[in-house]
Amino acid sequence: MSVSIQSEPIDLAAELAALGGSGAGGIATFIGHVRADDGVTGLTLEHYPGATERALAALVAEATGRWGLVAARIVHRVDAMRPGDAIVFVAAAAPHRRAALDACAFLIDRLKTDAPFWKREARGDEAHWVEARASDGHAARRWD
Amino acid sequence: MAVELLYFAWVREAIGTGAETMTPPPGVATVGALIDWLATRSAGHAAAFADRARLRAAVDQVFVTLDAPIAGAREIALFPPVTGG
């Protein structure tokens, strides 16, 4: 069970390989990428060191208890990224697929509302802070 | 009692610093009251805290609502709604 916050690109092959040894019957993963729509040329991510790790660890603990996971992993990038880069990797490993799939969806839905990250989008020389979306709140609340 | 204040994203930019240590007066008992008091400190603070609906908070690294008490807090963070993932 672990969480990582890192500036470096996410090594997806290594992350998947590490989960393969968990003995799970099913592993569900979600990979979020920096979108290139609307002319976005770059993304910078700020976070709250300490509180971020604490929030992600709490989500992993909740998912593990609720779905009986044998392993879970969250890797989130911070600092500067470009369109197409993987920004977040979420994985849930469980004895059966339904638990793995539901736990993975729970982790990414709740990460979006519970973890202190802030995105700043650049379009050429212009940059602005991304506004939170009401739909993210709705997605997170379906797990209440 | 002195408390460490942390600011993130556009709150940090409006205030011009990501951290400062302050000693709120004894009557400031909640996060919301702290925001009202901080807003009087400078034009940057006033701009950052003008719209309560756009502010979120954490006391000692735990997310709280703005009516949460701050007695005994060592670290209070004020920031916009989060946008990770």
Image: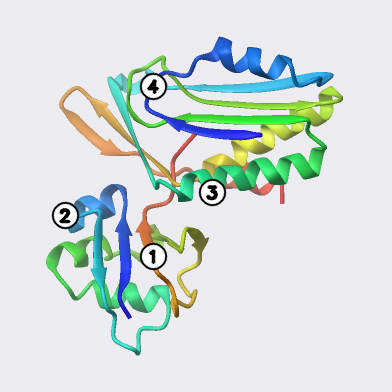
Residue holding disc 1? B75
Q: Nearer the viewer, residue A142 or B35?
A: B35
Q: CA distance from mark 4 to mark 2?
A: 28 Å
Residue at 46% of width from left, 63% of height from top? B60
Q: Is residue B54 visible?
A: yes
Q: Position of residue A91 (x, y in %)?
A: 65, 26
Tags 1 and 4 touching, CB below 8 Å = no
Q: Could you say which disc has been placed on residue A8 in the image? A: 4
Q: CA distance from mark 1 to mark 4?
A: 29 Å
Which secondary structure, mark 2? loop
Q: Amino acid at mark 2?
A: Gly
Q: Chain of mark 3?
A: A
- Horizontally, residue B30 falls left or right of residue B19, namely right
Tags 2 and 1 touching, CB below 8 Å = no
Between circles 3 and 2, the one closer to the viewer is 3
Give the mark nearest the N terminus, 3 or 4. 4
Which secondary structure, mark 3? helix
Image quadrant in which you'd find residue B51: bottom left
Tags 3 and 4 touching, CB below 8 Å = no
Q: Could you say which disc has been placed on residue B16 in the image? A: 2
Q: Nearer the viewer, residue B29 or A126?
A: B29
Residue at 48% of width from left, 45% of height from top? A52
Tags 3 and 2 touching, CB below 8 Å = no
Q: Is residue A7 above or below residue A137?
A: above
Both on one chain, marks 1 and 3? no
